[in-house]
Image (tube, rainbow, N blue to C red):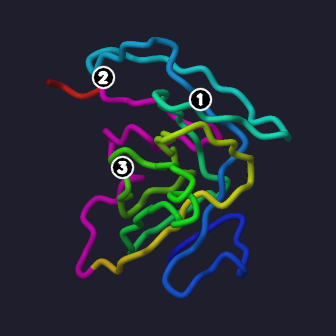
Amino acid sequence: MIVIEPFDRKCLGTNSYDVHLGKYLATYKSEVLDAKKHNEIEHFEIPEEGYILQPGTLYLGVTLEYTETHAHVPFLEGKSSTGRLGIDIHATAGKGDVGFCNTWTLEISAAQPVRVYAGMPIGQLIYFVVEGDIETPYNSKGNAKYNNKTIRPVESMMWKNSF
């Protein structure tokens, strides 16, 4: 079963579903990030007139849509229209886990200054069927770091790993 809330049939393409930028963005408080430390972020709301993304800054965004998948692997990709504005929506985390039940945090960067708006189409989800049994879905993993339901972007939890 695949859950997308809110669901709008007009967002359903031939092989993907369009997702939209939520109203919150975040940036890291520190200019230098440390993989072994909790890097805190500052959330802010995108104003009605939009917000200009600047090159050289990593922005964390969030999808408007909450999703669940229990027998499919979700992949999040940018839309070609977004890419043609010079906007990347994920640095590395384009694949979700079976059992992921949440909004998607986006790792947004811009090639040049570009104004973005809450509610604009930002990406597309593609789902692949899993063959066989799923031993441990993400939402039942004891060490899952991104299980808390949210409507705001979530910072990196790398610091919770042992290395």
User: On the image, numbered disc 1 is attached to which residue?
Assistant: 26
Q: Residues within 10 Å of mark 1 (few under 14, many from 20)?
A: many
Q: Position of residue 162 (x, y in %)?
A: 18, 25
User: On the image, numbered disc 3 is attached to which residue?
Assistant: 93
Instruction: Kindly identify the residue that appears in the image at 30 percent across and 16 percent down.
Output: 34
Q: Which residues are magenta?
A: 131-159
Question: Quick check: is 138 in the magenta stretch?
Answer: yes
Q: Residues within 10 Å of mark 2 (few under 14, many from 20)?
A: few
Question: What is the C-alpha distance between the residues marked 2 and 3?
Answer: 17 Å
Q: Is residue 3 above or below residue 148?
A: below
Q: Nearer the viewer, residue 116 or 162?
A: 116
**What's under tag 2, amino acid-wise?**
Trp
**What's under tag 3, amino acid-wise?**
Ala
Quadrant into which the C terminus falls: top left
Question: What is the C-alpha distance between the residues marked 2 and 1?
Answer: 18 Å
Picture quadrant of residue 14 = bottom right
Looking at the rendered structure, which numbered label has been put on residue 159?
2
